[in-house]
Image (cartoon, rainbow, N blue to C red):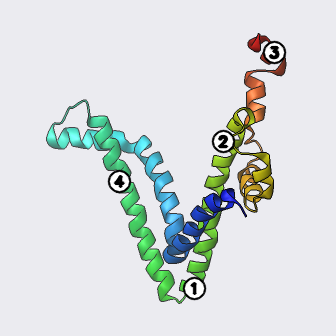
Amino acid sequence: MNYLDIILAIPLLWAVYRGFTKGLVIEVASLAALILGIWGAIRFSWFTADWLTRQWEWSSPSLPVVSFAITFLAIVMAVHLVARLVDKLVRAVALGPFNRILGVVFGVAKMGFILSIVLVIVNAIDRSARFIPEKDREESVLYGPVSSFAPALFPYLNFEEIRDRVRPEEHREEMRV
């Protein structure tokens, strides 16, 4: 176990704690609220802007930003309200322990995915900079499994392939000269 394991273990342990205390319903709702909030605000902030213009005759340059923020917050609050109701229902039918255990599983998977994306980016940068020694990577218990998690789910998540498409190998030598 080395410093990489500690760096990776801290957010994973936080995800275990958060998943256990919040449960699956709230964990999923948090992710859904963020995704639906952004999507809904992009799609429907025009409706909020139109309503603000009609109600208060507001025509400020900041209207698009304000309407986006209001729409986003309204959707996030609505999703969380529904999630709280579902969470209370789950607890009422005595499924609380399953909710908490599945919350841990989902929370760790979500955090593992986020950390894996970060490591994919770090690995892509590190190919040229070499700021994480190879020995530390090999000795780390968590580095291998976490760094391969997102690419296992999304095999096309390969920055090396993208780099080769943008700048083919034969053109790299020309660029160095």
**Label whose residue precedes the other's in the sequence (1 or 3):** 1
Contact check, label 1 and label 2, Cβ < 8 Å: no
Can you give x and y, in whole percent of width and height, for residue 90 in the image? 51, 82
**Label whose residue precedes the other's in the sequence (2 or 4):** 4
- Give the CA separation, mark 4 to mark 3: 51 Å
- Give the CA separation, mark 3 to mark 2: 24 Å
Determine whether, in the image, residue 164 is placed left or right of residue 96: right
Determine whether, in the image, residue 81 is placed left or right of residue 11: left
Can you give x and y, in whole percent of width and height, for residue 93 in the image? 52, 88
Helix, strand or loop at label 2? It is: helix
Graded by Cα atoms within 10 Å as few (under 14), some (14 to 19) or many (20 or more), the crowding at tag 1 reads few
Quadrant of the snapshot with the C terminus: top right
Graded by Cα atoms within 10 Å as few (under 14), some (14 to 19) or many (20 or more), the crowding at tag 4 reads some
Can you give x and y, in whole percent of width and height, for residue 38 in the image? 45, 47
Contact check, label 2 and label 4, Cβ < 8 Å: no
Helix, strand or loop at label 4? It is: helix
**Residue type for callout 4:** Leu
What residue is drawn where x is 38% and y is 62%? 78
Contact check, label 3 and label 2, Cβ < 8 Å: no
Helix, strand or loop at label 1? It is: helix
Quadrant of the snapshot with the N terminus: bottom right
**Camera-side mark, 2 or 4:** 2
Depicted 75 relative to depicted 46: above or below: below
**Label whose residue precedes the other's in the sequence (1 or 4):** 4
Depicted 146 relative to depicted 124: above or below: below
Residue 173: image tag = 3
Residue 73: image tag = 4
**Camera-side mark, 1 or 2:** 2
**Residue type for callout 3:** Glu
| Residue that mark 2 sits on | 121
Name, please, the residue furthest toward the right.
Answer: 170
